[in-house]
Amino acid sequence: MSHLRVGVAGVGHLGRVHTKLWKEVDGAQLIGVFDENRAVASAVANEHKTEDFPTFEALLDKVDALSIVTPTQSHFAIAQAAIARGKHVLIEKPITTTTEQAKALVEQASEQNVKIQVGHIERFNPALLAVEPYLKDPRFFESHRMAQFKPRGTDVAVVLDLMIHDIDVILSLVKSPVKSIDASGVAIVSTELDIANARIKFENGAVANVTASRISQNPMRKLRIFENDAYLSLDFGAKSVEVFRLVDEGAAVGAHHAGLTMKLGEIEKGDVPRAIIYEKPDVQDINPLKYELELFRDAIANDTRPIVSGEDGLRALEVAEQILLAIESNIS
């Protein structure tokens, strides 16, 4: 296909951004949008000079692929209908409300030979992309994701609203099954959990301590990674990375194209002296969501597995459900 014909289902806050960025993606043609709120759909269509389709089915008739940016509870029905028509789908996180629904979509997509990409946008954050060359064998993760309270998103627990971003990132970095989960959480200003903490242990011995809150005064999106000879700090919000690592004295440094490299000191312990190196890697100036859309386009054009596949979305949801069950057990 010369141009991928795309549409956007759901044009609330995030759907508007999808609409805007699809118009900037080379090799893609934005055909139009649909939203049950007809006034909102009309306004967004007029703003971005595209068509406002009166029904979801009318939009499906005209597109090859679809961004699904509706409330989580509707993801399954909309994606199911699109996949049944042979349409590729990019589903905002979480993929669905239940793992049973996610499994059904993954199986259906395989049968229809279409792509599912899940919108775990931190996988496309330039801070994560910059730190990946340094990672060898992560042993401990500490993540904090704090957001100011907004009524949007409170239809699901903070585990599915915010924490699932970090769950997905950590699962992508730890190549090992989950062994056990302990978690706690509380609902404060909504009927769903607003604060949650989970300790995830993996079979290879790695451990992740994950915290999320949507009633914080100061926003924060940070991930710290510890290895046997390195400490890596990522700030997803600021799109910055700092790396502290031990290297043999005299070894070459800066191999990862760090923008700044300096020696902080030495450790004499052992037969070979080791140096403490501080590096601040260069971070690409990219828009994570636009990059996500571009890679979705590429997966369709090249018939390759999406960076965040339906299976990845399913796995993140499975762990999120285990965390919710652990919290419920502790509350009981």
Image (tube, rainbow, N blue to C red):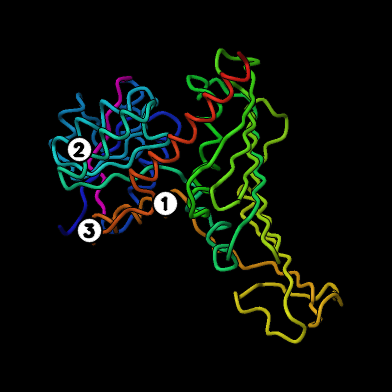
Q: Earlier in the sequence, mark 1 or mark 2?
A: 2
Q: Nearer the viewer, mark 2 or mark 3?
A: 2
**What residue appears at the point 80 percent right and 82 percent down from the top-left corner?**
271
**What residue appears at the point 42 percent right and 55 percent down from the top-left corner?**
291
Give the magenta part as a residue range: 28-37
- Give the structural element (helix, strand or loop) at label 3: loop
- Residues tagged 1 and 2 counted as in contact (Cβ below 8 A): no
- Give the structural element (helix, strand or loop) at label 2: helix
Residue 304 spot, x, y in % from top left: 27, 59
Q: CA distance from mark 1 to mark 2?
A: 27 Å
- Residues tagged 2 and 3 counted as in contact (Cβ below 8 A): no
**What residue appears at the point 73 percent right and 65 percent down from the top-left corner?**
244
Residue 95 spot, x, y in % from top left: 37, 35
Q: Quadrant of the C terminus?
A: top right
Q: Is residue 217 visible?
A: yes
Residue most extreme to the bottom: 250
Q: Nearer the viewer, residue 66 or 16?
A: 66
**On screen, 74 above or below 25?**
above
Residue type of the residue flagged with mark 1? Lys
The residue carrying pointer 1 sits among few (fewer than 14), some (14 to 19) or many (20 or more) residues within 10 Å by Cα, namely many
**What residue appears at the point 74 percent right and 72 percent down from the top-left corner?**
246
Q: Nearer the viewer, residue 125 or 80?
A: 80
Left or right, residue 39 beside residue 250: left
Residue type of the residue flagged with mark 2? Gln
Q: Is residue 33 magenta?
A: yes
Can you identify the residue that label 2 sits on? 108
Left or right, residue 17 beside residue 26: right
